[in-house]
Amino acid sequence: MSTKPRILALDLGRKRIGLAISDGLGITAQGLPTLERTNIRADIGGIYHLATDREARAILLGLPRTLRGDEARQANWVREFGARLEKRSQMPVVYWDERLTSVEAERVLRQEGGDRLSMKGKVDRLAAVILLQSYLDAGCPGLSATGGDALDNQTEQAALPSESDFGEWGFEDHLQPGDRE
């Protein structure tokens, strides 16, 4: 079985960045330690070194969207961060719909019996894993099969449930404002 280029996924937050990396076969996503934010230069440098150390050939950034599918307010901030990261790393940055990844991550952690204090940082890491796994399961659109070069840096797919699935999937107790920083 041939190896595929690794992908580093980021769940970008104001205080922390959740991180995940794909396995060498491009089948599974594995969580990495959450990065505590300092400043944009240090954050991008740290991500660049992590990507290099882990032999990543592309970066996946979660793109905030509303339940209706429109880009959320934070999307411009994420795109600006992605552009700076792409320039520094010279790796393709692909954007992927991150709707409900943090909600799902918090739900999973709550089921495991975690309290709010013990979940700090774990939500971000698990959200990055969920984001990357959905991208891998969709076949990595926007990346070529060889070499990992971006074919379309604007790849944004709705990989998660639609608004109509929201209640059906058990998301009615969603995060309140300020739960995720």
Image (tube, rainbow, N blue to C red):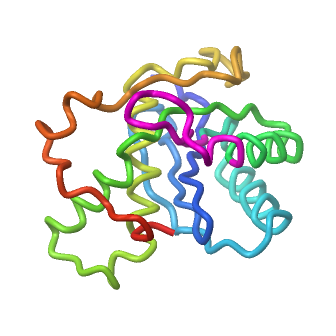
The answer to whether residue 128 is above or below residue 86 is below
Image check: 112 left or right of 126?
A: left
Residue 24: x, y in percent? Answer: 51, 38
Image check: 166 left or right of 147?
A: left
Residue at (75, 51) in percent of width and height: 52
Q: Nearer the viewer, residue 168 or 46?
A: 168
Q: Quadrant of residue 47?
A: bottom right
Q: Nearer the viewer, residue 20 or 165?
A: 165
Residue 112: x, y in percent? Answer: 16, 69
Residue at (79, 71) in percent of width and height: 39
Give the number of marks: 0
Residue at (49, 37) in percent of width and height: 65
Q: In this view, which residue lies farthest toward the bottom?
A: 117
The answer to whether residue 104 is above or below residue 143 is below
Residue 15: x, y in percent? Answer: 60, 71
Q: Nearer the viewer, residue 151 or 12?
A: 12
Magenta stretch, main secondary structure, is loop
Residue 110: x, y in percent? Answer: 19, 68
Image check: 81 left or right of 113?
A: right
In the rendered view of the protein, which quadrant contains the N terminus? top left
Which residues fall within the magenta stretch?
A: 61-77
Q: Quadrant of residue 155?
A: top right
